[in-house]
Amino acid sequence: MKTKLREILATAIDVDSDELTDVSSPDNTPEWDSFAHMTMVAAMEEEFKIALTLDEVKSMQTLPIIEEVISQKL
């Protein structure tokens, strides 16, 4: 699942997935703006057939956190 999450995030922020690390976040990845974040959220909801709450969306700031949030929904 981690690979798929990384691919979705990379597509949303328009970077190569190899550029993303576990510490990549909106604070240190200029391409990861609010629009890219919501694009990522929509893609993940569609891919995994889940609905995320506003608090979950706000918390999704790194790949490990994203993976944890999505895992809890499955």
Image (tube, helix red, strand yellow):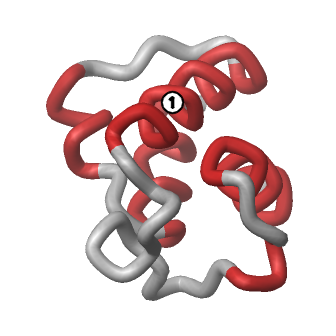
Q: Position of residue 62 (x, y in %)?
A: 42, 68
Q: Position of residue 52 (x, y in %)?
A: 38, 21
Q: Is residue 52 left or right of residue 7?
A: left
In the image, 72 versus 33, the foreground residue is 33
Q: In the image, what residue occupies the spot 34% across and 65% down?
A: 26
In the image, 26 versus 74, the foreground residue is 26
| Quadrant of the snapshot with the C terminus | top right
Q: In the image, what residue occupies the spot 43% across and 69% down?
A: 30
In the image, 41 versus 69, the foreground residue is 41
Q: Is residue 64 left or right of residue 65?
A: right
Q: In the image, what residue occupies the spot 66% across and 79% down?
A: 20
Q: How many marks?
A: 1
**Location of residue 42 (image quadrant):** top right
Q: In the image, what residue occupies the spot 57% across and 36% down?
A: 40
Query: Does 50 appear above or below 65?
Result: above
Q: Position of residue 8 (x, y in %)?
A: 74, 45
Q: Is residue 31 left or right of residue 56?
A: right
Q: Is residue 47 left or right of residue 26?
A: right
Query: Does 15 appear above or below 28?
Result: above
- Helix or strand or loop: what does disc 1 sit on? helix
Q: Residue furthest front?
A: 30
Query: Does 11 appear above or below 35?
Result: below
Instruction: Indicate the amino acid at tag 1.
Output: Val
**Residue tagged 1:** 41
**Location of residue 61 (image quadrant):** bottom left
| Quadrant of the snapshot with the N terminus | bottom right
